[in-house]
Each structure stands twice: as structure tokens, then as C-alpha cells.
Amino acid sequence: MAGKFQVRFMPDNRSAIVEEGTSLAEAARQADVFVKNLCGGEGVCGQCRVKILSGRVDADDQSQAFFSQEELDAGYVLACQTEVHQDLEVLIPPETRMEDAKIMVSEAEEGAEGLQTVPIVRKIYMELPSPTMDDNISDIARVSRELRKRLGWHSYEISLSCLRRLSEKLREAEFKVTASIAKDKNRYKILRIDQGDTSHETYGLAVDVGTTTVVAQLVEMGSGRVLGVAGRPNQQASFGEDVISRTIYACKEGGLQAVHEAVIKDINELIGQLTSEKGISPQDIIAIVAAGNTTMSHLLLGLLPCSIRLEPYVPTADVYPQIFAREIGIQINSEGILETLPSVSSYVGGDIVAGVLACGISESPHVQALIDIGTNGEIAIGNLDWLVCCSASAGPAFEGGGTRCGMRATKGAIEKVVISNGEVSYQTIGNAKPRGICGSGLIDCMYELVKNKIILPDGKFNLDNKDPRLQVVDEIPQYIIAFAEETATGEPIVITQSDIDNLMKSKAAIFAAIKSLMDYIGLDFDQIETFYVAGGFGSYLDVEKSIAIGLLPDIPKERIKFIGNSSLTGARYCLLSETALEKSIVISRSMTNIELSAYQPFMDEFVAALFLPHTDRRLFPSVDY
Amino acid sequence: MAGKFQVRFMPDNRSAIVEEGTSLAEAARQADVFVKNLCGGEGVCGQCRVKILSGRVDADDQSQAFFSQEELDAGYVLACQTEVHQDLEVLIPPETRMEDAKIMVSEAEEGAEGLQTVPIVRKIYMELPSPTMDDNISDIARVSRELRKRLGWHSYEISLSCLRRLSEKLREAEFKVTASIAKDKNRYKILRIDQGDTSHETYGLAVDVGTTTVVAQLVEMGSGRVLGVAGRPNQQASFGEDVISRTIYACKEGGLQAVHEAVIKDINELIGQLTSEKGISPQDIIAIVAAGNTTMSHLLLGLLPCSIRLEPYVPTADVYPQIFAREIGIQINSEGILETLPSVSSYVGGDIVAGVLACGISESPHVQALIDIGTNGEIAIGNLDWLVCCSASAGPAFEGGGTRCGMRATKGAIEKVVISNGEVSYQTIGNAKPRGICGSGLIDCMYELVKNKIILPDGKFNLDNKDPRLQVVDEIPQYIIAFAEETATGEPIVITQSDIDNLMKSKAAIFAAIKSLMDYIGLDFDQIETFYVAGGFGSYLDVEKSIAIGLLPDIPKERIKFIGNSSLTGARYCLLSETALEKSIVISRSMTNIELSAYQPFMDEFVAALFLPHTDRRLFPSVDY
């Protein structure tokens, strides 16, 4: 019979009692200790390194590839591949821990004009006439009559629970009450009736449910004023770093609930943080608008994401129902609603719809484009007449994955690099000792390497270059950005031929997607009035270098605008404007989605873009290396 | 400190452990034993007679008026006025028990023509095309697209819980599924998605929630076929026999929940009975339409009825929201809906709206009238252009209350009486020994007494009449219908001057209401094409005698139609027809309600009708006594 054992995690000194045979990764989850997990527990990413301090575990041949002999001797194992068969004490080393990421909480300020500011939930204070024999219509008819006068809409729905309290509420308040009204598609709902005038105490929350980070903004609904913003790493990361691995986890038995609850917990934590900072009660929050990619939206609502990942890439829903936030365990007012912004397709989600809305692309007479670069690059192009979009799998390179020394944009990440006369200078996040290179640092590297002819336009290291930082180790060329003695880990930070190859594929995929979409609509780059670059990664990009490596199209720099977290901005617009929320549905429905995985011109463009800056040099006239 | 005591009720041999000081009536409720209760526990109706078999209770001076000295010596007390202070054994005598009432389950067959038979919940079997790369819209969009083709409506809502199961359901069923679709006002909801073709297994329930009885009809939704009908006494009677006393109970602390649950229990019992008889599962019932008076509808939904009873008579709602039946604890399919038919006002409820619909009054080019006689008489008159209605308080006389020997139409009730040459012949329900007189028997009595000149047209006993059955006891004249030796109780069954006075007021109120409404619309009785008489009481009325005492207007008998339970019929129409349900709302909204309690012409008509048949004899040309 299987027993139960205690696993203690250091340095947190937290422990869990688990069944025999449980994985260390699962034990860590139960102990509420974060362990990195890029592959979703498949044992292939090597990110969940932990060290056994006391107790014995069985060796796992497959995982040994991730460790040096010294590490194996010291007790290093992969948490996801190691089972518990006795009491254990386990150290989670720094590289396996989650650190505060550089969370993008700033946002676009474009496109806000022209939106009517009628929030999606509004509070109407009413002093109703008391019933008389000449005017003895029902309580709900009395409330509806006044709402008709005030709002002009002819019909109002009410839930049974609200109706049950109506009679007492009206009489206790001597018919002076505040009604909270929400619009849902083409109808109005009376969410609650409160005694007296509570119309000045209405708050809403805009949430960007990102794969990496969840950011929430607390908004005063009447004035539209942003009271505060807070972000935290998406705790779903413990089930897999990227969308695919989380999806795989969610589609295992019982997995969906765990992944779903993780993001709900994040949102509740952010609500707790923001409301306590501002001295208001979560009960005063009456509405939430959430934007995320299609998988994040599914996981937020507890919808199975399994068919999103597999051809032919079908999500459960594109437009999501308005729900009570309590239905998914979000702790705001019990009648508070949650709107999830609509998706276009499995790989173009509500975050992009929010971005298009935030940038005002669908209102503009001129053609504009939006690009959001992450593991996937989503691109939307259009104007007030038409919209097209696509999503290209860029691989994890820009987010710190898939490269030897890649890391997320957290403390110690090299984010800027300049190479000049054989000297490398760099800048790290938090000015800490370097621990790795994040996306913007890698782009800088690539540019600096090609400009300094350390790599050639085909992306291969120029072994004729005699720069001493260029070395060949085990037949693989690599370039040393930071020597071992400079780094926090004591290991050199390098960029290898394989890293360059991956980066090349990533940038080629993004550019090919943009180019394919432009060709699809029959326009040239110079016809794009504004090129918005969204997302946390985007904000730290060096425009010139991004163009120079052929990631972004070669258009005048002033036409490229970094707009930060446009997903959050769009969500806030929808919170503050019924019209914006309706527009988000129109945008999602009217956007033509090009499925690149089945689109031959994209394949051709991809191959053509596997060059620095591009095989067709005419596309990059301003590039001078 | 108060202790707890056991109270055992015989002959059921059921017991309850109650706190010291609890009333016997409450103890009976806790033991799930029925005790009659006309006044709602106020100690004024004397119906809750019980006999203490062992143990002692304190004498209650006020209640003693209801008992003879022999009864007091034998241990008779009123259950509602007697507190428990020690262990007791209590007998509930037959007169205090509930017996199966003569429950009206037959119904109108008028007005069914012209209704489109699109049931309010329909099941659509769909063989959806599997997703391909060229057709990879979301699952919900795929379902909606097919529904659009099949139903023509452009948009479909879905609950989060249904959406959560959609992806798996579709794939497990290889995209061959049945969608259950409900219409709610102007929108369509997808209630559930089932695997395979379940479209032939759709059942619905029409329910008449009467104050006295609850009747349910099991209907096959596709064909409209009635599979079965069952009724049972409304168990709310244990909280008060009539609407007013139940309302008073419901407005006490905790009272609403108890009264609400009682009727839910009734409906669940009827569902259990009907489904087990027909060999189907309650899970196969997907919709319920309920009709009742305004108070019954409020109690069904758990809405406070308190302001209905008090001037200016304001209900919480007139149109009720569509809800899931589970929300109020009704045990059918978890996604099954419940529609409650709309009311017109506090005293003209969904049962009358259902009746107007069932009779087709609002479709008729000719003027028709509907009257439902009970404790209140509700009257609706109109045609396809206009509708007016009112409600008159008739008092409890027609339902067996307020008269010395009155009783409900249950076994042993005298329902027909003929007096001829000093001889009285009568007929009882179930041909049992007589125990009292029910409403139709009292109307017969009144007619026979005035025809035989035992009472005079002013309703007073003619003491010049030497009929030996006419006696004066304690200065009150009374007429013996059945001598003591003929009856089940060993007491004579009599009708007293006070009984006649009460009956006179009841019939005057009903007639005055009809007459006031006719005058209001400016029509004469001969302009009424059909005069429908609804309700359990109505079906047993003798038309000629009812006209002769001035209860019903003097119109040709063939124009008067007894239509039985038109509330149930109307509810079934709404179950089977979206159009009918929509019409019910139009009827409720378009009916002009005359509030008689504040209407002077009604007062005048009432006084004028306190005569047999009426002070204005010209209104009753056919009456020949």
C-alpha cells in the first residue's frame, strides 16, 4: 500500500504531505511553491531543476542530459520527472524560481477619442414616487418605468435573486434607490438595487490576462479615472511556461480546473492589492473587462482549450457570454459582471481585438497596422472599411526561451548590447550582474553581430573574424557577450550558432507574416500610416536595430509607435464604454483571419526572410551594413 | 432554561421534538402532519381542533368558545393556540385532517385554434460538418450557424456551464448533437447540448398553482399530447386556508421560505407521480409553465407578497423572469426552464390571463367574458380590441367558509339540494353521509329557499312559513337541510340567517363586479356572446339557479360555458406555443384593471344586488319566483 510522505521545500521552508509516487513538481504546487516549467511537465525543457538536500530519489536516465556530472553528484534532478518515495528536503535554486518580471503596466493613449463614456455598468439613483391607488403598478414596473425615462431603453431584465429583494429594498429606502444596470448584447439587466444614493461608488477593473503576466487596472467608472494598476506573473506558469504546454496540462484529467484556478487566484490577488491600496472594498467593484489571447480567455472562463492547439485550430467560443464574476470565483460584488473580449480565431485573441480598438484602427480612414510580438506574433492591419489579421508562431526566442542564455525580461537580464571595436558593452535590467539575455538584448546582439561582420547576412558566424570572443566549442561557434567573471552565475553568457538560427527563424516568421498580410491586401509598406507595436517586449525594442535585422518593415521611424499594453487599454475602454464593447464584437467579427499554417505565400516569404535583413534587399533600403 | 419535548400525533403516529413553548400547529408541521388552518394561526377560525390524548396543556380562555363543555372535558384544544410544555400525545380528528378534495383537472378546449405549435423549449437535432482548415469557426459559432439556418433567428445565447461542456460534447458525439433551445422574451438561449438525437424525448409540464389545489399536466412537447394530469391539495394550506392568511404568514420572519417550499414540494410530488406513472424520468422534462393568482405566483417564486395585501395593493412583479426550474428547487432537467404567466394586478393574476388566452377572448371579434369564482371573483371582459378586468372579494362562502355548516367540495359535502313540498332531497359528493354543504350546495339552498318562500327576496327568513324545518334557535332563524340522524357527525346540517346574509354578500359582490365592468365599457349583457365560467367551483354550478339568485347575469343559458380549469389550459398553450406565451404578456399588459375597492359605482351596484335576484328586477326577466 502506498504511503504518504512529507516534502519540504527550501529556502521557503514550505512543505506538503503527498501520496507516494507524486512528482516533486506536483508536491511543489501543493506546497504553493513556484517551480519553473516551460514544457508542462514533459521533462523536455530542463527548467524545473531542483536539488535534493536530504532523502533519496531514483535516478532518471532521461533527465541526466540536463545536468553536468557535478550537478548530478550534488543531487540535482528535474522536479517534473522525479517521484516521491520517502520524506524529502528539496532546494529550489534561484534559476528555477519565479522572479518579478518587468511587467508592462503602461499603455496606449491612442484612439480614446470619440468613445461615448457610458460604462458597461452604470448606477442610476432614483427617487421613485411611492405607490398610490391611482399608481399601483408592480415594484419592478415602477423601477423599469423610471429607467425607461432615464435611459430610453424600453425593457429591463432582472434576476430572480434581485427580484426577491426588491420589495423590501424599495420600502426600507422609501423608494429612494440606486439601480446598477448592465448592458448585455442588446438588452439591459438590473443587476442590483441598493438603498439610497450609491452612484458615486462605482469601480471597475480592466484586466490583461497575458500568458506571462496578468495586469489589472482599477478604474472609477463615473469619471473614467485610473486609480491604480498592478501586475503579477501569471501563476499558470507552474503548469507550463507557454500557451502550448499549459494547454497540454489543461487537457489532462483534472488539469483544466487547476490552470483555471491559477489565473483566478492571480486576479483575486490583484483585486486585493489594488482595493487595499486605494482603501475601497472589492464589493464596490461592479464590472470587469478581461482581454487575453484565445487560450488565456478559455482558461479564464474554464473552457477546454484542447482543440485550439490541434489542426484545424477550433476554439470553443469566439464571443464569450457576459457572466457574473462570482461564477468563476472572482471576488468582487456578488452581482458584478465579467466581460471577456471576443477572439477572432484560435490564434488571434481578445488582446489583439482590444489593441485594434485601443489604437482606433477600425475608426481610421488610413491604413494602420498593429503587431504584438511574443511567442506568437499577431498582426492586424486595416482601417474603417476592412480588417485582416494573422498569427505567426515566432518560437520562444524573443521571450527568452530556445537560446542557450535566454531569459525573461527580469532582473539581471541583458536588455541592451553594443559591440564596437571588439568591445561589448551591455545594460542589464535592475543594473544587476548579468544572468542571461532577454528578447530585446538578443535583437541588439543580432544587429551588432552582423554590423560588426561577426555573423554574415545568412546568419552564420564569420569564422574568418578574429574577434577573440568568437570561439568554437565542441564544433559549435559561439560569441561571448559576458565573461564568466562578470556574471551572476559564474558562467559566461554566450550566443551560439544555434541561438542565431532560432532568432533568424523567429524574425523571419514575424516579417513573413506582415509581408504576407500586406500582399494579401495588395498594399505596400509605405501605405501604412502608423505601425503600432504592442506588448511588453515591444516597448523595449530598439526600432532601428529591429528594422536593420529585418524584424520590422523598413518604414520611417516616426510611423512606428510603441503603445505598451494595448490589450489593457482596450479592456479599459470597453469597461468605460458600452459602445466600445459593442465595437469589440464588430471588430472580432469583421476581421478576416488568414491561417498562415496553411498559406503557401507565407512559406515562401518565410524562406525569403531567412537572411539579414532579407533576401530581397530592396525591401530594406535604409539598412546600411 | 427551556427544554425540548416530544409531541406524538395520532393516528399517523408521527412525532416531532420541539422547543418548549412551540405551538401544537407548528409541532404538527414539523412532524409533517396536516392540520387545517383557515385563519393562519390567529385562533379565530376554529378549524385546527385537536384532542390531547396524554399529557397536560394549559387552558386557553379564548379558544373555549369553539368547543362544547363535553369537548373541553375530552381534551379538545385549538392547535394554533396551544403551547407545548411537556411530552404530549395528540389526536387529529377527521374534521381537522386534509382529505382529497374534488380536484378539477378537466379544462377548456376553446381557443386552441390558430396557435402556432412551436413549444417554448424545442430540441433540434443537428449533424454538423466537422471542422476543417477551411471552416474552423469556433464550436459555438458552428452550432449557432446551424441554428440560424434551421430557426431563422440570428443570435443565440449560451450559459457558461453549457459552454464549458460544448467542446467535449461535440467531439464525443462526432458533431451529431441535439440542442435544446428556449425563447426568453426576444432572445434565444441554448439550454443544453446532448449527444445524438434526443429530440423525441421532450416533455413539459403545465401547472395551475391554485390556492386550494395544485394541478399539473404532463405534456409531450413535440405532439402536444397530454400524457397525464394529477392534482393535490396545496400544502400551503397548513399556513392558512386563504390567500390573506398565507400572506400574513409569509410576511412573518422566516415565513416566506416555508410557504414557498410547501408549494415547491407539491409540484415535485406531482412531477414524481406523473413521471413514474408514465415511465419517464423527471430529467426528460425541460420546461414548466405555471399559472396562478398574483400571490400564488409570488409565493411560487419566493417573492415577498406583503404589499399585495395592503392598500395600494402593489405586487413585486407582474411579468416574471424566465428562470431555471432548479433555481426554486423544482426537480426536472437541470437546464429546464420555468415560466410563470404574467399578472395584471395584485388581484388579477396569471390564472386569469391564462383563462383569457385559453378562451381566445383576445382573439375574438365578439365581446366575451370570463369569470372565475372563488374567495375572490375575477372577471375579464373584452375582444380582440380591448380587455378590462377586475376582482371582487366574495368572501369564503362559496368555498365552504363563513357559514355554519360550510365545507369544501370534498367527500360528504352536500353539492345539490332540492326542496319540494316541504321535503328536502340532496346529493353528497361520494354519496357519503353528509358532513356539510359546499358552495354549489349553498347556491342550490338559497335558490330553493327563496323559491319555496322560506326566505324572502330581501334574504330574510320568512317566519310566517310554517315549514317545521324552519326553526329559531337562540333568536337566530335557521333551516335544517339534514337532520342529525342523517349526518356523519350526528349534528344537524343547517343554514342560518347569518349564512344567508354572507351568501347574499358574496353573490352581490360577484354580480356587482360584473355589472360595474359592463357599465364601465358601456355594454349590456345581451352584447356578450359567450360568458365563460372557470374554476373548480364553476363546473358544479347549476346555471339556472345561479342566475335565479342573481349571481350570474340573466343571459341565454347556451351562452354560458363552464370551461373547467382554464388556468391549466392556458398554461399548457404557453408551454406548447412561443406565440401563446408572448400573447399572455400582451394580454396582461393590455388589460385595463378596475380597482373596485376604490370604485364608487361598484359600491352602489353592490347595495343594489343585495336582493334576490336583484333590486332591479328588469335585469332578471327570466326569473319567475
Image: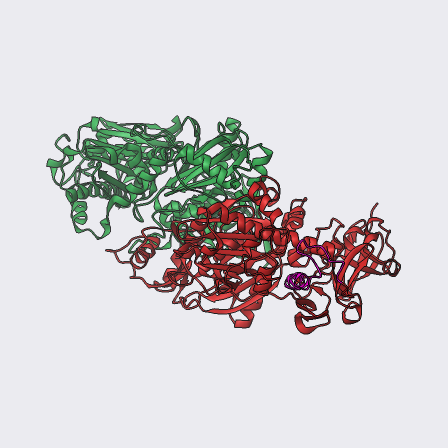
Chain colours: A green, B red
Q: From which residue to which does the magenta span run?
A: B439-465
Which x, y percent locates residue B130?
30, 61
Q: A227 or B509, which is in the foreground?
A: B509
Res A6 visible: no
Quarter of the image for residue B261 reads bottom right
The N terminus of chain B lies in which quarter of the figure?
A: top right
Number of dots carrying numbers: 0
The image shows residue B210 at horizontal and vertical percentages of 58, 57
Q: In this view, does B323 lie above or below A460?
A: below
User: At 25% from the left edge and 40% from the top edge, which residue is drawn?
Assistant: A379
Q: Does the magenta stretch include residue B457?
A: yes
Whether the magenta-drawn stretch holds residue A302 is answered as: no
Q: In this view, does A487 lie to the left or right of A275?
A: left
Side of B175 where B428 appears, left or right: right
Query: Could you say which is closer to the camera, residue A366 or residue A491?
Result: A366
Front-most of residues A54 and A9? A9
Along the viewing direction, whichever of B602 and B625 lies nearer the viewer: B625
Residue positioned most to the left:
A618
In the rendered image, residue A313, in percent from the top left (x then y), is placed at 30, 53
Above/below status of A269 relative to A604: above
In the picture as drawn, the residue positioned furthest to the bottom comes out as B431
Look at the image and tell me in which quarter the C terminus of chain B lies.
bottom right
